[in-house]
Image: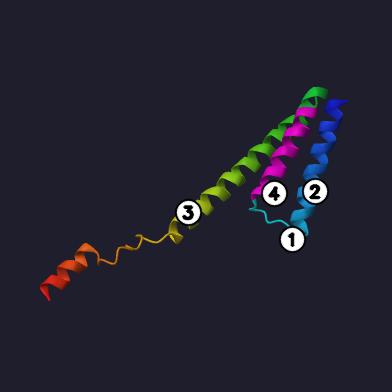
Amino acid sequence: MLASAMGWIGTIGGISAYVLLSRGRWDATSLRYSLLNFVAGALAGAASAVYGAWPSVGSNVLWCAIAVHSAVTTLRKRRARAVIAEPASFPDHTGEPPPADRQLLAAA
């Protein structure tokens, strides 16, 4: 009974992820899309293992691996964009010019 429920929840989750993606509500690079695909694949795969449906287990393990790869790729891209967006240095709020500017002022 538990395996059957897990299988149905996984199936509904996988179909829901696809419907949300195809209707434009979610993006293929969103973390929630990857998470829902991973959870759906894990639940359906576990249920398939209980019933001994090994081809289904294999495809769901692959589905989980693709979801993890997608999430990792998305996180790496977000991190790279965040690093590029950060300023090179933080402004000095003491009111003093930076050391290089002090030397230029002293030479003037």
Q: Residue at x 48, y 56 (%)?
A: 82
Q: Amino acid at mark 3?
A: Ala
Q: Is residue 25 left or right of residue 106?
A: right
Mark 1–mark 2 distance (CA, rounded to whole Å): 12 Å
Q: Quadrant of residue 90?
A: bottom left
Provide the residue span drawn in magenta. 31-47
- Location of mark 3 (residue): 80
Coordinates of residue 75 in the picture (x, y in percent) = 55, 48
Residue closest to the eye, 106 or 9: 106
Label of residue 33 in the image: 4
Q: Does label 1 or label 3 sit earlier along the sequence?
A: 1
Coordinates of residue 61 in the picture (x, y in percent) = 69, 33
Q: Amino acid at mark 2?
A: Ser
- Identify the residue at the far left of this view: 107
Q: Are marks 4 and 2 in contact (CB under 8 Å)?
A: no
Question: Compared to 26, does 53 lie above or below?
Answer: above
- Location of mark 1 (residue): 24
Q: Is residue 78 left or right of residue 51?
A: left
Q: Residue at x 71, y 31 (%)?
A: 58
Mark 4 residue element: helix
Q: Does label 4 or label 3 sit earlier along the sequence?
A: 4
- Location of mark 2 (residue): 16
Q: Quadrant of residue 66?
A: top right
Q: In the image, is residue 43 part of the stretch drawn in magenta?
A: yes
